[in-house]
Structure formats: structure tokens, C-alpha cells
Amino acid sequence: AQSVSQHNHHVILSEAASLELGCNYSYGGTVNLFWYVQYPGQHLQLLLKYFSGDPLVKGIKGFEAEFIKSKFSFNLRKPSVQWSDTAEYFCAVTPVGGNTPLVFGKGTRLSVIA
Amino acid sequence: DAGVIQSPRHEVTEMGQEVTLRCKPISGHDYLFWYRQTMMRGLELLIYFNNNVPIDDSGMPEDRFSAKMPNASFSTLKIQPSEPRDSAVYFCASRPGLAGVNEQFFGPGTRLTVL
């Protein structure tokens, strides 16, 4: 079975700092990878996804993620965070071609301070 | 499209009472998922349906929890009797049945508090 590890539980950054959130998954086959964001009091929304092709994926609001197959990683990055990026971020994985649910990591809470 | 709709948004009840959470998936989506979110355990998959049929309910914590999907546009998650440790946010999500389309669309969630 697949699993996802997000090693950072809570990250605190100042505005304009660069962000990198770690995500590692365990699965031997080909996967689809996702980052979801949950703003305070809201539901999960898709930030970006990797299906195939270019391992550097660009999403909304200036976020990007890089799939490194050899490291089973899909880290999320943003060069300069804003206060409005304060949220919880979830990495998720599912096997390619399967019809199984996404498997989520436990999430990383990002707090951006002025 | 209105997206995934859940009701109620907030529910406060007393221990021992029956609780019913409702979900309307996005029209045309063949898969429906119920998740529970807590601080301690994160986002847990409880059960999911494909074409109204339960596929995997291994995440349902115990017999007090049950879920149904009587038709393509409606699902319920019932807890009977409820306990304080059931307090959590319960999310419903749906996705199309098209091969290769794995993105799940989430509803706003129901925040359940059991006193």
C-alpha cells in the first residue's frame, strides 16, 4: 500500500521568505502526485498535480513542485511567500491507472508572519 | 457547477445521539469519498463508493459508523451512537470515473462536536 510522509509538521516563515515543504511517498510503481491546500476554515483545494512529462510542475499562486523519482519525492516550493499563503498543505499520491483513492500525508501547517 | 455540497456545516450533539452527515457529489462524478480530519490523525479515508456501490469501508472506525449512497447524487454518513472522540471535521469528496482522472474535489466539510 502507498504511504506519504510530510516531515514538517509546522513551518513558520516571514513574508518574502522562500518555502520548501517536503513530501516523500512509498510505492514501487508509477504514481500521480498532488498538492492540496486548505486555508483556515475552508476545504481542500488542488494546488498542483503531476501526471507525467516534465517533472517540474507549476501550480496556482506561484507554487511549483518537483518530482524526483529516484528520491520518491515531490517537494513543494515557492520563492517568496505571502501572508495569504498561511494554510495547511497536503501531499497526496495514487497509482497511475488505478481507481483507488488518494492517499494523503498528515499535512504541514504553514504560518507566514509579517 | 456548485461543487460538492455537504450539510450541515456544523453539528453539535450530545454523546449517545445519532448524527447524520449528508453529501451531494458533483454531477456526473462516479466516485464518492468520506474522510475524517483530526489534529492527531490528519486526513483519514473512511469509505468510498463507485457508482453508488461501497468499494472499501476498511477505514470506518467501528460499527457505530455506517454510510450509504442510495443514488448517484446523495450519500449519508451516520454515527450511532456518537461519542466525544468522534469530534472532527468530516469531508466528502468526489471525482469523475474517467480513466486517469484522479483529482478529487472536496466539499466544505461538516464540523462535528460531540459533547
Image (spheres, rainbow, N blue to C red):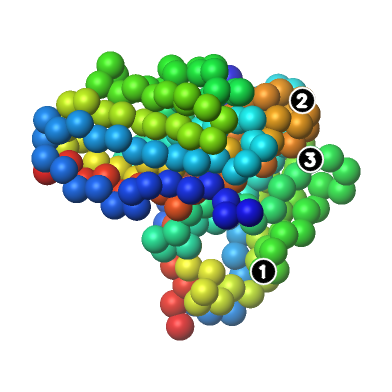
Q: Are marks 2 and 1 in contact (CB under 8 Å)?
A: no
Residue topped by disc 2: A97
Mark closer to the chain start, 3 or 2: 3
**Quick check: do tags 3 and 2 share a chain?**
yes
Give SS at disc 3: loop
Q: Amino acid at mark 2?
A: Gly
Subunit bearing disc 2: A
Q: CA distance from mark 1 to mark 3?
A: 20 Å
**Marks 2/1: CA–CA distance:** 29 Å
Instruction: Give the residue number, with chain letter if any, for mark 3.
Output: A51
Label 3: few (<14), some (14–19) or many (≥20) C-alpha neighbours in 10 Å: some
Sequence order check, earlier mark of 2 and 1: 1
| Quadrant of the snapshot with the C terminus of chain B | top left
Decide if residue A48 is in sight here. Answer: yes
**Residue lying furthest right:** A53
Q: Residue at x 42, y 28 (%)?
A: B46
Residue density around tag 2, few if under 14, some if 14–19, many if 20 or more, within 10 Å: few
Q: Is residue A5 visible?
A: no
Parent chain of label 3: A
Q: Which residue is mark 1?
A: A61
Q: Chain of mark 1?
A: A
Q: Residue at x 44, y 36 (%)?
A: B35
Mark 3: amino acid: Phe
Residue A105 badge: none
The percent position of residue B97, horizontal first and vertical second, equals 70, 30
Residue closest to the eye, A70 or B76: B76
From the top left corner, tell me how far across and down residue B71 is, in percent. 52, 27
Residue B31 percent location from the top left of the image: 60, 30
The answer to whether mark 1 and mark 3 are in CB contact below 8 A is no
Which secondary structure, mark 2? loop
Q: CA distance from mark 3 to mark 2?
A: 10 Å
